[in-house]
Amino acid sequence: MLETIRVFAGDCTTTFEGADDQIQRGHVVVIIKPDRTVLVHDTDGYQPVAWLTRSESITVESDAGGFGITARAGEQVLRVIGHEVTGHAEYPATEAGMPVGTHPETGGSLIQTSDGITVINSDIKYSLPKGATVQDECCESCGLPMIEVIAGERFEICLDRKCEPLDDVVQERFDNEWACPDCGAPMQIIRRGGRLLAGCGKYPACETAFALPTGVVVDICSCGLPIFETSQGQRCLDATCGSFSATNDHSKELPDGVGDKPDNE
Ligand SMILES: [Zn+2]
Ligand SMILES: [Zn+2]
Ligand SMILES: [Zn+2]
C-alpha cells in the first residue's frame, strides 16, 4: 500500500504557537507528509514560511469553502486556515532513493533506500546486509544486481538471498575454520536472532558464540580466534578478548609501566 502526500493551496492564515509565535497570511501551498510533517510554502526560497516536523497529531477539515489544518507536537501548534481554496489533492508517494538497476522480471527500477532495495510500483523488497554495496554486475541465474557483503571476507552474491543464500557462502568459507576458545571444538557459522554468528560446534553443551563483525579477517589473535579489520579498526572476533588488547599496537606504544595497569574502560 502506497503512502500519500496531501497538498492544499489557497489564501491562508498560518499561525504558529511555540517558542516564537507568528501569524502570516498569503496564497500558500501546504504539504502534509505521511510522517505528519507539515510544510507551508510561499513564493520565496526553499524554506517553508512555517512547518512542524513529524507532528504527534494532525486534524484536517475541509469543505468547498475552505479548510483547516491543525498539527501539534508537544507545546508547538501549527494552524492553517484556508479562507479561499485554490485546490487540494492527494498523491501516492514513496521514499526516494538511488537507482541501482532494473528488476529483470517486472522491468521496474530498483531503488536503494534506507531500509534495503525496493522495486518501484511494486511490493517487491530486498533487504541489504549491513555494510553491503550494490555492484554493476548482474547475477547469471536471475539477472538481479550482485551485492558485495563483508562477513569475514568480501563476498559477491546475488541481491536475492533466495537465489544465492548469504549464509551458505559464509558457511562454506568459515565453517570449522576456528576453534572454540572454551572447549576447542571447531566453530560453525550459524544464524540466530537475525545475525550471523560463529558458534561452538558442541552447542548446546557449549554455548560460546560471537556475532561476526562487519569486517575482513586479517590475522589470527593469540587466543586462536580471527582478527577483523572493521571501519572502527582491528578487533578480535571476541570483542572482550583480553589477549587482543594486550597485544594490539596501541598498548605497545604506551610508555613503560603504563601498559601494566588494568584496563578500566
Ligand atoms: Zn540471482
Ligand atoms: Zn565450545
Ligand atoms: Zn582474541
Image: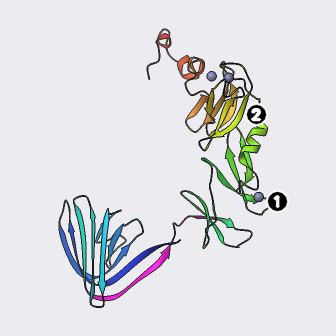
| Mark 1 surroundings within 10 Å by alpha-carbon count, few (fewer than 14), some (14 through 19), many (20 or more) | few
Asked if labels 2 and 1 touch by Cβ distance under 8 angstroms, the answer is: no
Residue at x 60%, y 44% (from the top left corner):
194
In the rendered structure, which amino acid carries the disc numbered 2? Asp
Residue at x 62%, y 71% (from the top left corner):
122
Query: Could you tell me which secondary element the residue under label 2 belongs to?
Result: loop
Ligand 2 is within 8 Å of the C-beta of the residue at disc 2 = no
Q: Which residue is mark 2?
A: 175
* Cα distance between the residues tagged 1 and 2: 26 Å
Mostly what secondary structure, the magenta segment? strand
Q: Is residue 169 magenta?
A: no
Q: Position of residue 90 (x, y in %)?
A: 43, 80
Residue at x 41%, y 83% (from the top left corner):
89
Q: Position of residue 253 (x, y in %)?
A: 53, 18
Judging depth in this view, the residue of 206 and 259 nearest the camera is: 206
Q: Position of residue 121 (x, y in %)?
A: 60, 73
Q: Which residue is mark 1?
A: 140
Where residue 151 sits, quadrant-wise, is top right
Identify whether 47 is placed above or below 210.
Answer: below
| Mark 2 surroundings within 10 Å by alpha-carbon count, few (fewer than 14), some (14 through 19), many (20 or more) | some
Q: Which residue of the protein is positioned furthest toward the top in this rendering?
A: 257
Report the image quarter containing ligand 3: top right
Where residue 207 sits, quadrant-wise, is top right
Identify whether 265 is placed above or below 26.
Answer: above
Q: Which residue of the protein is positioned furthest toward the front in this rendering?
A: 205
Q: Which residues are magenta?
A: 84-99
